[in-house]
Image (cartoon, grey):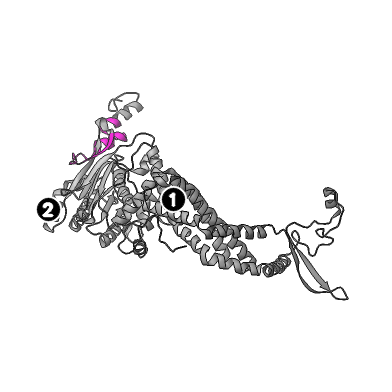
Amino acid sequence: MENRFLSLLYPDEESLVRHSSRDNLPDITPEVCDELGLSELFDLRTSDLSDFFTSDPRVIEYRQSTLADMLSVPEIRDTLCRVQPVLNDIEELRRLDSEQTGIADSYLYSITEIELYVSCIDAIAEGLTPVRDRIKSPAISGLCSLVSELVDSEYYRELNKKLNALSSRVREVKSITIGVNLDNQLRPTNAGVISVNSETFKSGRVLDKILRLSFRNDAFTCIAPLSPVGKGQSDNRREALSAAFNSALEDVFRSSVKGWREIAGEYVLDSTDFLLRLLPEIEFVTRAVALVERIREKGCEMVFPTLRPMDEKAFSAKGLYNPRVALMIDDGIVKNDLSFDKDASIYVLTGPNRGGKSVITVAVGAAQALAQLGLPVPADELTLSPVDGIFTHFPEGADDTIDKGRLGEECARLREIFDNVTEYSLILLDESLSSTGAYEASYIAAEVLSGFAAVGCRGIFSTHLHELAARVPEINRRSAECGGVPVDTLVAGIEGEGKRSFVITRAKPDGKSYARDIADRYGLSFESIMNGIKSKNGGQDPQKA
């Protein structure tokens, strides 16, 4: 077979090599994938989701075409899903083969591997050939063409014939006949295999003869066991007997093994490697398609984003939502519009508890990450530029370090982000600096936001610190002095009587900090407290009770 490059995710060998060398890959770590909920949604087994991120527009567009084919032609995904477990079996078989030293075992593994390889090629051909005229992507078209050439080749047909003959020969071996020469005192002098047989020998016991209604003694009836095999046999005796038989079988099969290795090693194993190299890609694209279909079944749209150059720093979404939340709820999900533009590269997002601040913050990160995997995004429309990294600073609970304390730990994590962030990065901060008082938190947060604005990145700071939103004009003055980007405010909305709308609007916070809403929600407003006291006193005013 011609050594032809084929990938479901990379348009050419150069782009794959560049990706494998990790040059200029976006800084999106497994931890970020976890915090955005993507690791859970994909649940990959053969690789990490972070291995697939790219900032290369050519790679992204190539993947988009692959996924578009798989979504419009379900037979493609069905075919790849059938092939994936077989490729897993081949990998496991190779692992077992590497641990064996016996020729007979290796021979059997080789035959089994080629049988699995042939089943993969046949499955791909049977699945893709009927839908070939509906395939548009270079990746799936290339796979279809390569497999068709293999199946139609004289070598492949000859391989199947030889494989069937060799497989039959091995699978039909049920017993061997052993000959032992004796001296004049009936002591064994040498022993060897007389024949390899396609039927098992009979025990020769009287009960077995009665059950089979056969009392004849022939070449396949045992008249005395050579050695106790199985129950009651020591491990050493079992291993010694097995080693003796394997050694004899290796001599019998040696010439076949040599010929088979020449066939398998020069051509077929290379072809198997081509399929094994695709295994992580097959798992990735099939899981991606399954995710998109699950979300669409919930009535939510998933669209391919329009790409803009990185230096445009574009992000303009209509109908944006959090994919993990969409899968968790049965009611319709609230969608939001959000854009980074010349008037706002960073937002301070405030609003009530459980008002949707964290949800939209994660939604922005998930959309950016999915776009840089080459996948559809959770929105009605999205235009964006690739980023060189996504950096998150989300709550970590009570796992504080002893020497720093929780505030120190939060500040250390923020310092690490500054060590890596650039003007082309996306930063997502959710309730950062919540481990200290409002005054200290607002002061540090304003310093941090001023720093991010000076860097020129895009981002969202979701916070309960309404005092921070009030300091946005001051932050913008400092940013302008050093040529930084502007900061603006977003508000998570509340409808009448404290009901949450989960709609995010570009507006100034009302300054009330939603304290009244929180107090009412938990029954801590003065009115709620007084009503509770009256109920305990049988409806009487506590001062008159």
Please tell me which residue lies in front, 52 or 479: 52
User: 412 above or below 250?
Assistant: above
Kindly identify the residue that appears in the image at 85 percent across and 76 percent down. 183
Whether the magenta-drawn stretch holds residue 448 is answered as no
Residue 43: mark in rendering: 1
Q: Is residue 521 magenta?
A: yes
Farthest residue in the top direction? 539
Q: Between disc 1 and disc 2, whose residue precedes?
A: 1
Task: Tell me the kind of residue under disc 2.
Answer: Arg
Q: Which residue is mark 2?
A: 477
Q: Which residues are magenta?
A: 500-528
Q: Which residue sits at x=30%, y=53%?
A: 392
Q: Give the image location of residue 129, x and y in percent.
A: 46, 48
Amino acid type assigned to the residue bearing label 1 in the image? Asp
Contact (Cβ within 8 Å) of mark 1 with mark 2: no
Q: Nearer the viewer, residue 225 or 73?
A: 73
Viewer-side residue, 527 vs 45: 45
Q: Is residue 2 above or below residue 182?
A: above
* Residue neighbourhood size for the residue with mark 2, other residues' Cα within 10 Å, grouped as few (<14), some (14–19), many (≥20): some
| Callout in the foreground (1, 2) | 1
Secondary structure state at the residue bearing disc 1? loop
Find residue 463 and report its horizontal and vertical position in percent: 26, 46
